[in-house]
Structures are given as structure tokens and as C-alpha cells.
């Protein structure tokens, strides 16, 4: 790309306001097959050299200012690879421009090129790197560093093939303008392809947390500005964001592990959004949201991060359950109770481990209780935004079906505001966030004592009768099916279900025994 074209990329306005670009230099030594990385110690990782474009400075001038002290190059060797445009975002932000540079030669020979990684020495060298130190790394070394959570973002690996293809095409064709990629940054949406009345797990979790479109936009703005110029969230940046939510700094790594469902040591925006939804006090601990929350809880306490919870990890969970209920147990009492609960999952030896599926099954079958008080923020995200003087509308506690950005397709997901017998919704929220009560509210199963007919509560979720349900279970209902459905009613109270047929059979033999 010539200098004239580079000059055209320097203007970026959002809502009429000038927003300076981030310029990223991807410097690749094709002879030694290494990338140049800079250690951004305050940001918690290594990454490509980058800089914010100064006022009245062209992109070409920025990239020269960035790389002139590092390598010898020709201006013709600079190629625009990728533009991340933020003009479609609902807030003022930065564009991110990637430029690939094939240097003539390196002036800084701080290169680790032994091919094989000496784990101990490699990690020692990483820990002793000074701020803004320059190193050359192979792809293998970059993968190793990513496992140590020492990259600012995943781009050096996720874009690695793309960069190398461009470098090799440049060598073969001797034409540096063979690839220009344009990408518009948009707020990620969780789409549902289901046309039934049941949402997917992610949608249901966000609805239960009452994450409106306004809240999600604010969370994305917070996330986007924190991770720039990368698109990924590393541990150090996560710490800065999560501490604003009032969580204990001693357990930041545990929260990060819980959010990281893919175990890649870096979070995307959706990872961050769903993790906050699982933490939110508004999220009910029943049905689909409860199952999703239990997955986060399991990862939070699974310190070894191996999908198998040890007895010591399980005991920490029991301790926190009682702590959050205001109860302090002695070590002996705690150990005895943890042992009893551990055995309720069918485990007889302390050397055995608890799997995620067994944990979900035990909680779902009520063999293990108390998880509703775990993994919670002190107050809802909506209230945190209000207290931080951000422009969140006062009515964010109700999800409007016309504005929620988790709504895709023709179906609408909405929550009806339920009337309370006393007090206001705001008062209830304050009580929930400021006081601790030694009880939990949950909906599990209904037994009609008069007839002995067992009714499954999940079948009641299909009845869209808002007046007959609580505020929490209203989250499962769809406005498109607001009428009382006769077939659903028959299924719900059908006395010829398998469970009721079994009861009738037992009573038949019971009468015969009495006679």
C-alpha cells in the first residue's frame, strides 16, 4: 500500500467526534521464522508493538515512529493487513489497524532461537523481562507463553496463519498489496435458532440476570476500552474489570478460571458477559440458570482445573456455603459435614474425585443443597452502573422485549413485571444486596396431597399464565403463547403419566395386601 493510501486511513470519527486509531505493527523475520514481541508489563503480557496515533499524525507516520527504533525497513515493505472499524458501535471508540512489516535486518538481537523450549529457563527469562523489553519468539514459544497466560491477547496465535500467508505471498509475488481485510466491530449477540418456547442456555441466563440491551452495551463498552488494541481479556485486565464489581481480590484467579469455560486462558466478550450474568444476584438458582451457575461454581472451586473436584476443593465449597449464611463451623464439624456431603455423591474414599456431571446431577436431585448462596456479586450489575453514574435507565430491572439485544429472529422473549404484596422492587433489591438471610428460595416439585398425584414443576413452565406464577419463573414465558393452552394443561395434570400409573399400581397391590 502506498503512502497516499495510508494517509486516507487516518480519519476516524464516531458521532462526529475524532477518535484516534491504534496502530499495530506485525514484524516477522522470515529468515529465522520469528515474530517481534514487546513486554507490556503493566498490561500483563507480551504482544505486537502498538501505539495510539497522535493528533494530526498519519497512520504511516505512526508506524514509522513505532518501528524505526527497532528494525531497518523500507516503506514499501509495509502492508495493511486488517482494519477493525468501530464506527458501528453505539459509543465512541478506537479503530485498530494492523500493519505487517518484513524487515531487512534486525538491529536488536535479543532473540531466543534454540528451537526447543527449556521450560524452566524459558519461564525464568519471562519473569525477568523488563517493561517494554523486546524479544523475538517462534510460534511454538508463543503457544507456550499463551498457556502461561503471558500474552496480552490471542492475536499472535489466532492471526498467525493469516500473517504468514501474507508474508509468503509477498515473497512469491513481490507485491505487497495482495491482501487487505476490513472488519467492522459489532457488539456480539447471542442468537437463538430455536423456534420453540424454550430459550437456549445463554439466552435464559442473560434473561434471568435481567441484562437489558442498555446493560449489555455498557458492559461491552467497558470491555472494549479495557482490552484495546486486543480483542481478548487476559488475567491482568480481567482483574482490573472485576475489582470494580466489588469482588475479593484474593480470588481473582478463581473467578477467571470460572469464566474461562474453554480453558484457553483468555476470555472473549461473551465469556465475560455470561460470567457476569452467572454472578448477578438477579439470576435465579433454579431451572436452566441454576445448571449454568453450577457449572461456573464447579470451575471456581476446581483449582486443578481438570474437571475432577477433590475432597479438599469440595470442602472449600462447604466452608463458603456456611460462611455466606453467616455460620462459622469448627474444623472438625466442617470436615465431618463435607465428608457426609461428599459421600452423598456416591464417593466412598477421599481419594476419589467428583466429576462435573455427578455434581450437576446431585444438585439437580437435591442431594446437595446450598449452592444458591455461592458465586454471587454483592449487588446487581444494573445497580453498579447506576452508582457509577453511567447512563443506565432506571427501568433496567425489567427486560423490554422490543429492545433486548439477545432477541434475534421473529420470536420475542420478555419478562412481565410481577406485583409484590408489600414494598417496591427497589426495596427488595436493596434487602437482597445489603442483608444476609439464612434461607434460600427454590422451586422443585409439587405434590398434590389430596389426590396423591405427582406434578412435575417443569411442565408448569410451559403454562404461560403470568398470574399463576412467580416473578422468577416468569422468565421462562413467551408472550407469543400467553393464552392458557388446553393441551399443556392436560399434560401437566394428566393422571395417566408414568409416575401416576406406577402409584396406582402400587396402591392396587397395597389394597390386596390389606385384604
Image (cartoon, grey):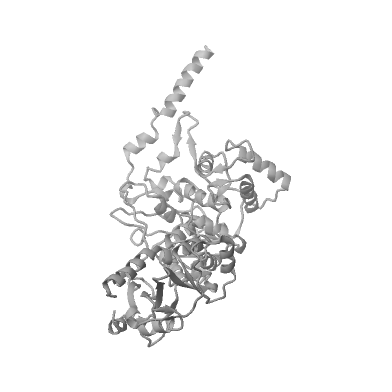
x and y percent of residue 86 in the render?
Answer: 35, 72
Residue 265 x %, y %: 50, 59
Q: Quadrant of residue 164?
A: bottom left
Q: Quadrant of residue 189?
A: bottom left
Which residue extends farthest bottom? Answer: 56
415 vs 222: above or below = above
- Along the line of sight, the residue nearer the viewer: 350 or 513: 350
Q: Which of 25 and 330 lies nearest the eye of the viewer? A: 25
> Of residues 424 and 135, which is closer to you in this image?
135
At 57% across and 50% down in the image, what residue appears? Answer: 302
Q: Is residue 181 in view from this perspective?
A: no
Residue 125 in the image: above or below residue 259: below
The correct choice, above or below, for 303 with respect to 452 in the image is below
Which residue is more in the foreground, 232 or 473?
232
In this picture, residue 463 sits left or right of residue 437? left
Task: Give x and y (percent) for residue 376.
Answer: 55, 56
Q: Is residue 181 above or below residue 270?
A: below
Horizontal side of 195 relative to 38 (left or right) equals left
Which residue is at 51% across, 74% downward? 110
Horizontal side of residue 268 vs 317, given as left or right: left
Residue 182: tell me if it is visible. yes
Farthest residue toward the top? 515
Amino acid at each position: 500500500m502506498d503512502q497516499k493510501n495510508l494517509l486516507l486511513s487516518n480519519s476516524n470519527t464516531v458521532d462526529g467526534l475524532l477518535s484516534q486509531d491504534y496502530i499495530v505493527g506485525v514484524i516477522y523475520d522470515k529468515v529465522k521464522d520469528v515474530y517481534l514481541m514487546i513486554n507490556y508489563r503493566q498490561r500483563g503480557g507480551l504482544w505486537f508493538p502498538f501505539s495510539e496515533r497522535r493528533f494530526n499524525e498519519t497512520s504511516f507516520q505512526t508506524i514509522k515512529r513505532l518501528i524505526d527504533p527497532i528494525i531497518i525497513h523500507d516503506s514499501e515493505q509495509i502492508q495493511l493487513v486488517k482494519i477493525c472499524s468501530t464506527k458501528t458501535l453505539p459509543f465512541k471508540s478506537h479503530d485498530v489497524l494492523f500493519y505487517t512489516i518484513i524487515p531487512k535486518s534486525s538491529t536488536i538481537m535479543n532473540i531466543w532461537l534454540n528451537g526447543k523450549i527449556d521450560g524452566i529457563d524459558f519461564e525464568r527469562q519471562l519473569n525477568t523481562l523488563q517493561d517494554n523489553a523486546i524479544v523475538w519468539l517462534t510460534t511454538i514459544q508463543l503457544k507456550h507463553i499463551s498457556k502461561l497466560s503471558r500474552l496480552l491477547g490471542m492475536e499472535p496465535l489466532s492471526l498467525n496463519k493469516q500473517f504468514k500467508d501474507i508474508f509468503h505471498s509477498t515473497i512469491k509475488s513481490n507485491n505487497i498489496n495482495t491482501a487487505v481485510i476490513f472488519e467492522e466491530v459489532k457488539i456480539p449477540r447471542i442468537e437463538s435458532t430455536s423456534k420453540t418456547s424454550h430459550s437456549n442456555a445463554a439466552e435464559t441466563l442473560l434473561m434471568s440476570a435481567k441484562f437489558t440491551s442498555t446493560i449489555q452495551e455498557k458492559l461491552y463498552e467497558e470491555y472494549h476500552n479495557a482490552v484495546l488494541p486486543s480483542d481478548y481479556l487476559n488475567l491482568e485486565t480481567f482483574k482490573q474489570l472485576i475489582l470494580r464489581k466489588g469482588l475479593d481480590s484474593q480470588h481473582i484467579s478463581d473467578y477467571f478460571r470460572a469464566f474461562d469455560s474453554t480453558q484457553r486462558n483468555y476470555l472473549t466478550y461473551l465469556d465475560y458477559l455470561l460470567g457476569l450474568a452467572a454472578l448477578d444476584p438477579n439470576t435465579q438458582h433454579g431451572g436452566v440458570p441454576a445448571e449454568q451457575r453450577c457449572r461456573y461454581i464447579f470451575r471456581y472451586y476446581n483449582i486443578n482445573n481438570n474437571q475432577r473436584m477433590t475432597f479438599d476443593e469440595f470442602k472449600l465449597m462447604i466452608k463458603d456455603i456456611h460462611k455466606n449464611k453467616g455460620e462459622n463451623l469448627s474444623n472438625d464439624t466442617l470436615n465431618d459435614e463435607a465428608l457426609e456431603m461428599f459421600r452423598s455423591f456416591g464417593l466412598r474414599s477421599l481419594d476419589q474425585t467428583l466429576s462435573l456431571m455427578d455434581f450437576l446431577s446431585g444438585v439437580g436431585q437435591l442431594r446437595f443443597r446450598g449452592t444458591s448462596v455461592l458465586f454471587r456479586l454483592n449487588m446487581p450489575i444494573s445497580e453498579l452502573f447506576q452508582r457509577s453514574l453511567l447512563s443506565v435507565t432506571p427501568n433496567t430491572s425489567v427486560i423490554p422485549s422490543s429492545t433486548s439485544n439477545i432477541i434475534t429472529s421473529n420470536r420475542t422473549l420478555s419478562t412481565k413485571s410481577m406485583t409484590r404484596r408489600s414494598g417496591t422492587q427497589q426495596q427488595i433489591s436493596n434487602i437482597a444486596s445489603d442483608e444476609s438471610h439464612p434461607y434460600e428460595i427454590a422451586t422443585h416439585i409439587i405434590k398434590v396431597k389430596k389426590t396423591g398425584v405427582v406434578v412435575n414443576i417443569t411442565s408448569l413452565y410451559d403454562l404461560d399464565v403470568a398470574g399463576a406464577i412467580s416473578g422468577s419463573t416468569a422468565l421462562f414465558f413467551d408472550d407469543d403463547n400467553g393464552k392458557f393452552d388446553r393441551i399443556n394443561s392436560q399434560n401437566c395434570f394428566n393422571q395417566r403419566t408414568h409416575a401416576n400409573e406406577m402409584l396406582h399400581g402400587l396402591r392396587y397391590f397395597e389394597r390386596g395386601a390389606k385384604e
